[in-house]
Amino acid sequence: MANLGVNICGVDFKNPVIPASGVFGYGREYEELYSLSKLGGIATKGTTITKRMGNPAPRIAETPSGMLNSVGLQNPGIDYFIEKELPNLLTKDTVIISNIAGSTIDECVAIAEKLNETEVHMIELNISCPNVKKGGATFGVSCEGASEITKAVRKATTKPLIVKLSPNVTSIVDIAKAVESEGADSISLINTLLGMRIDINTKRPILKNNMGGLSGSAVFPVAVRMVWQVANAVKVPVIGMGGISNGKDAIEMMMAGARAVQVGGAVFTDPFAPIKIIDEINSWLDSKGIKDINEIVGSVQPW
Ligand code: SIN
């Protein structure tokens, strides 16, 4: 069996597979199916300072090889997370990454300050949610916005800080460099691509919010391309996500330069997907005689 362990800004992961923020809640439903300690890490649902009910329904639409969501950051708020969910998560032998998603810089700072007093292992700053009017991707689509919020949150916490980027930008490399220069310890990408579906019988958009974020296998090549571009442009470790649904996808993403991967929509079709992906990575490495997963990170040989 190959070594599957990876290190991201000083934090050891037993393997590189992390259920992505928003698809795994706080793990409660999944811990009935398997031990969460098998996972490399868990990224929790984006948390705001107070409870949010999210956007009106319908907020999910099927698409070819994917789905659109406009959930709108429904979550119970940071105090509930810290009091009721984090203690259970911290009993698991896995890395807990708390995703934070405030509407303003001050809100993100306040959430980060609260998390700084906890035992959470890492913070993932979401500057890329396309489904909210304030905050989210409004921070992440300009270098100025991305820099300003990263700088402020960086000052608010000593926890390793991952910044999660939006693909809905002209130059992902410029945004990545901007957050790296303001103190991001790691960069995760990609969040969802802004999309839209219309019911041709009613002429109404399928989502009540009109637009939503596209995820699933359909976005995988876009994610691989952006991860490759960013990994070649920054020094901090990159975490890749976007349409990963099996072990080969995870290996491809790591060859593009990702040190670890997050698995999103695949857990909706198969809740065991992260566990299967760990096993498939392991089998593939064994079949190639590769003893350490770190050997494949960034190993693509471009023409
Ligand atoms: C949502 O809650 O709308 C999705 C979160 C995200 O895309 O960051």
Image (cartoon, rainbow, N blue to C red):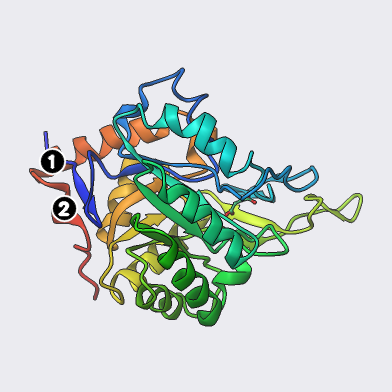
Place residue 223 in its image quadrant: bottom left
Place residue 182 in its image quadrant: bottom left
Is residue 273 rendered to the left or right of residue 39?
Answer: right
Q: Residue at x 58, y 36 (%)?
A: 80
Residue found farthest to the top: 32
Q: Residue at x 25, y 57 (%)?
A: 9
Residue 48 in the image, given as x and y percentages of width and height: 61, 50
Q: Residue at x 30, y 74 (%)?
A: 234
Residue found farthest to the right: 202
In this rendering, is residue 220 above or below 174?
Answer: above
Place residue 106 in its image quadrant: bottom right
Q: Residue at x 36, y 73 (%)?
A: 180
Q: Which sits earlier in the primary sequence, circle 2 or circle 1?
A: 1
- Residue position marked by numbered label 2 in the rendering: 294
Is there CB contact under 8 Å for labels 2 and 1? yes
Quarter of the image with the C terminus in it? bottom left
Identify residue type, mark 2.
Asn
Q: Which mark is residue 3?
A: 1
Residue 96 in the image, given as x and y percentages of width and height: 38, 41
Residue found farthest to the front: 117
Does mark 2's beta carbon lie closer than 8 Å to ligand 1?
Answer: no
Q: Which mark is residue 275?
A: none
Identify residue type, mark 1.
Asn
In this rendering, is residue 158 above or below 52?
Answer: below
State the count of labels: 2
